Image (cartoon, rainbow, N blue to C red):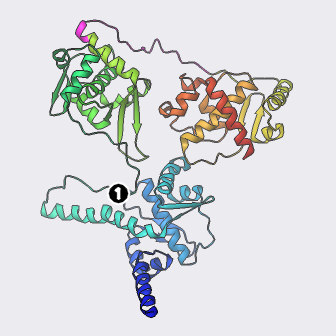
Amino acid sequence: MKMEENNTESEKLNILKELLVDESHTIEDLKRLVNKSKPFIKIESNSGKILISPEFPFNIVEKVMLYLIGVYFSKEMGLNEGLQVTLRDISESIHEMPTSTSGPLGGLINKHIVKREENSYSIRYHEIENQLDILTEKYLVLKEFKESKDVKKIKRPKSRKKLLSHQDKPSVIKKKEFNEENFNQAIQRYKLKKEDVNSIFNVDKDFIILIRGFKGSNLIETHIKSTLLVLTANQLYFSLDETDASELRRALENSGVDKLVSLSTSIKKFPSLIIHKRGPIGSINNSYKLTNLGLQKGITIIKDVLNNTKNFSIPTKTKIKKEVAPSISIEKEKLDKNISEFAKLHDLSEEKLKTTFDFQTDNLRFLKKIDENSRKVIQITLLMVLGVILKRVYYIDSFNGKKLLRDSHMSADRLDLLDSNKDYQTYFSKKPKSAMQLTYAGELKALEMLKKVLED
């Protein structure tokens, strides 16, 4: 009886072992994996350098994965056994800036495709075949289909499969569904009549076209008014506060709005009304979201059109005054005294302050590296700790963020996008980027962050 039980347990274990994944599986199937890799990567026999095929238009995510797959194979061959693959190594090997690589790499880590141990990155071996299959389908199967289509004149398929099953997905925009009850409640809330609203918008098969009221005195005003109207219509008719960027452009184009090539530039100037939500780097998935203030302005435009009033206006170029941050200037003796008093008041190590920051009479620089993958987090963290020191040590309230980042050898790329970040909106005043300023909440948070930076 006992022998039968042992046999049963042994059979169970043999069946369950089929679920186990370990390094030996990859080695056993090495020939198959190498064949799948050959169209995409090559490895130099002497140096072990990974060469990614220039034949295909790989995006950054794909190049990062292929490089790490190549490193895995090269280590199996004994070429790069002790190699610690850092962010800088990956960026240099795929010919991209670290600031452009860090985001996609972080996304792959979050999706458990890539693992990080200390500062070294590697592909998870059980993901190799899955990712190679996805790349094969995208670049080889579709390529063969396209070539055969040219010969046989086969119609192009209406859709293409996405690159990565694990790639970051854009924010999901709800399907449009008109609900008359919700619509009636919305227009009643804003004291509007159905026939009046329908005189401004034409909704045809869930698609919105502006009939009137969107033209302004200049291009920027036209862009902002028309965008607010389309987004407001989506809110009223379909209870949607977010609209796909391509859908917005189609609606504006069909409504007769001109020069849409500069639409995003116009919208970017008014983040308090419209938030531009971008997808992952390299992604074409973008959307526009109405803020509460933006919805109020949209309703104001509707009432202006109906009542022939002019309550909506946006600042013209002549009204926008760009505030310039003051230059840093302080006497050496005064600076040393202020540093000492600042350290004592906030229970900070004066020695660590001076080894972490380069205090100059006409400049302030951060000397260490912030261990974060996100460009936005690095920029906000650095601007906050530098900003609080400028305020409490140099007695300067506003500062040039771009200059501070560049002087500290940090990326100042896409600084104009920080307005959409929740932390930025909380901790910084909404001044032009040439004269950033911390809010009171920002100062308190910056002091906490400064203590943490000095402890690391």
> Foreground: 84 or 193?
193
Circle 1 residues within 10 Å: few <14, some 14–19, many ≥20 = some
> Foreground: 423 or 99?
423
Please say whether residue 262 is visible from this viewpoint: no
Q: Secondary structure at mark 1?
A: loop
Name the amino acid type tagged 1.
Answer: Leu
Q: Which residue is mark 1?
A: 163
Residue 439's x, y, as percent?
Answer: 61, 24
Residue 232's x, y, as percent?
Answer: 29, 24
Residue 268's x, y, as percent?
Answer: 42, 28
State the residue at coordinates (33%, 16%).
218
- By secondary structure, the bulk of the magenta-drawn segment is best described as loop
Can you say whether 128 is above or below 301 in the image? below
Q: Describe residue 258's horizontal placement relative to residue 83 as left or right.
A: left
Q: Which residues are magenta?
A: 305-324
Is 264 one of the magenta-colored residues?
no
State the residue at coordinates (80%, 34%).
347
Can you say whether 47 is above or below 192 in the image? below
Can you say whether 141 is above or below 33 in the image? above
